[in-house]
Image (cartoon, grey):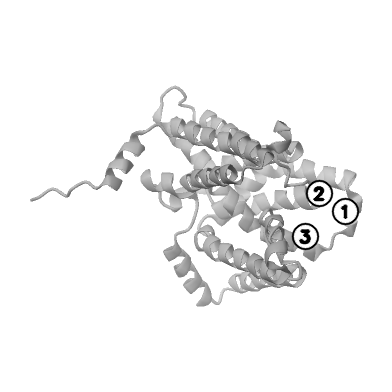
Amino acid sequence: MSQIKETTMDKVSRRLSKFNPLLELLIVEGIYIIFNWVWLPRARIAGNVASEIAGLIMVGVVLIWMSFISHYFRGRNLDDLGCATPIKYKLLLKKFRNSNNPRNVLLFFGIYLLIFILFTTNIIDATKLLPVLGPLNMNLVPLIGNFAVVIISIIEYEVLLFFATRIMLKLENVKESFSANFVNTFPLLFVLILVTLIEFPERIESVALVDAMAYMFNYIFWAFVQQVPFMGYVNTQVREGLERQELITNHRARKFIAAGITGGIFAIVHFPAWTLSIIAGFMSFFLSFAYYEKETRNMFMTCIFHAIFGLIVVFFFDINMQTTYTALFQ
């Protein structure tokens, strides 16, 4: 019998799978920090458009590596990352449509209620459909006009909604994941809610409930964009890296180390907005505990709790998410 010739992709996959995940994480995050912290700010201050574009391309390449390429070469599937495969998603929808279970009917109408709230509150200002991208879209107004920017913003949201829900909506362990995430994040949530009630009562009184719900619904999908390359990549790399070595064998200690590294990197991502950075770091630290365990690893639930924190911090604290690194170099 003739042997099957090993392809270049197979060779890369074989070699990368043997490469220490912790060392890969150090290299990848180092490249990300260099380009995001040093290269891009200096290029913007100098007004060097070509250098800025090159930096953005490198940051994009790193994020794509973290989100897809590394997982592919290391042989991970969507279930390993706490996501649902598109096939499972279709089967779940088929089962849902054919079910007479009252709970499923209630879930169905609940989802459509959230969609109704979304479009009745935010369709006028379509640039608010996605955080961060919205302000960037506004920069296009002088070039292409308001109407074109509204269309672009809606298309961005719908495309993200389609692709995110295709692999995000894992329902098999929703109950277990929700319980674990709630218990783990409750202390931080309690503190943030208490601070909001004490320090920002006027904002709570002035905010409509439907606006807050719409913002949280939007943020679930933006959380997905952040959590795939950071929680999905960082936590997984640390977990697999720790499992390969024999220096630390205690499971609880490994989980704390993975949570600390994941939270630390997520805090760095939000720097230099100090308040946002600290809260994001602690949030990711607590969310890491449920994500570390196979039984409670669910990207959908991670994004739900991320959206709750996003609602409190950005909507009520009114933190500027557009703080840039350029101030560090001026």
Q: Which residue is mark 2?
A: 318
Q: Amino acid at mark 2?
A: Asp
Circle 2 crowding by C-alpha within 10 Å: few under 14, some 14–19, many from 20: few
**In the current view of this chain or complex, which residue is farthest to the right?**
202
* 302 horizontally vs 64: left or right: right
Residues 154 and 100: in front is 154
> Where's the C terminus, which quadrant?
top right
Instruction: Residue 277: name its quadrant.
Output: top right
Query: Which residue is depicted at the point 71% across and 68% down?
Result: 145
* Element type where label 2 sits in the image: loop
Q: Position of residue 209 (x, y in %)?
A: 81, 63
Residue 75 appears in the picture as rendered: no
Query: Residue 212, labelled with which disc?
Result: 3
Task: Examine the rendered structure and indicate whether residue 149 appears above or below residue 36.
Answer: below
Q: Position of residue 94 (x, y in %)?
A: 47, 73
Q: Position of residue 323 (x, y in %)?
A: 73, 43
* 200 horizontally vs 150: left or right: right
Residue 224 appears in the picture as rendered: yes
Mark 2 / mark 3, whichever is N-terminal? 3
Mark 1 / mark 2, whichever is N-terminal? 1
* Element type where label 1 sits in the image: helix
CA–CA distance in space, label 1 to label 3: 11 Å
Q: Are marks 2 and 3 in contact (CB under 8 Å)?
A: no
Q: Which circle, 2 or 3, is nearer the viewer?
A: 2
Instruction: Residue 100: name its quadrant.
Output: bottom right
Circle 3 crowding by C-alpha within 10 Å: few under 14, some 14–19, many from 20: many
Q: Amino acid at mark 1?
A: Arg
Q: Amino acid at mark 3?
A: Ala
Residues 224 and 170: in front is 224
Number of numbered discs visible in the structure rendering: 3
Query: Which residue is depicted at the point 84% across and 46% down?
Result: 196
Q: Which residue is mark 1?
A: 203
